[in-house]
Amino acid sequence: MESIEADYKSNFGWLPDNIKNKIGHFNVFPLMPFVGEKAKHVPNKRRDFYKIMLIKVNSKLYYAVREVEIQKQVLVFSNPQISYNFEHLEGIKGVFYCIFNKHFLISVGIYKFNNYSVFQSNGDHVFELTEEQMNAVSDIYKKMFDEIASDYV
């Protein structure tokens, strides 16, 4: 299982100062290390953190027990209970993602996060979006970028 610290080191070569704080960890990124000529392969493995990806790409997403073909824009939820990897059939057209750990969920009052189907191993993890939904979720990610860049704790 890949730790959140190993993910930072592998993808960015650095660790944020607040990675071990008591309120948990949350961060948001454009998916830059995984697109274009410098794209990295996403190996099939489990991670000890949660990830929500907004993706606009023609690809296949492989879970341990199933395969999902993605032809439009989707919102993908991953969690520590499932392993996954992507096979991109063409270039990614636009994507953001956020990562967080269970301590962050608890700090914001979500104690029974396994009750949500997106956090269960047999739940729904991929949601196809309309163009309008894609724009709305993109706006949420932009607000997250603004908040992360602010000095608000």
Image (cartoon, grey):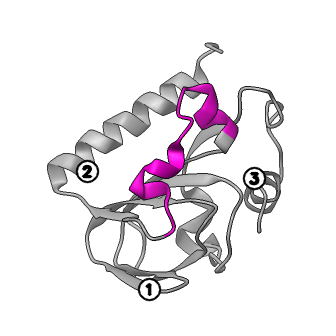
- Which residues fall within the magenta stretch? 103-121
Residue 72 on image: x %, y %: 25, 70
> Would you call the spot at circle 2 few (<14 residues within 10 Å), some (14-19), or many (20 or more)?
some
Badge 3 local density, few (<14 within 10 Å), some, or many (20+)?
Answer: some
Circle 2 — which element?
A: helix
Foreground of the two, 108 or 11:
108
Residue 66: image tag:
1
Q: How crowded is mark 1: few (under 14 residues within 10 Å), some or many (20 or more)?
A: few
Marks 1/3: CA–CA distance:
25 Å
Q: Residue 4 carries which label?
A: 3
Check residue 104 for magenta coloring.
Answer: yes
Q: Which of 78 and 143 is in front in this view?
A: 78
Residue 106, quarter of the rendered image: top right
- Residue 134: x %, y % from top left: 26, 50
Q: Where is residue 124 in the image (x, y as percent from the top left)?
A: 36, 65
Q: Position of residue 149 (x, y in %)?
A: 59, 25
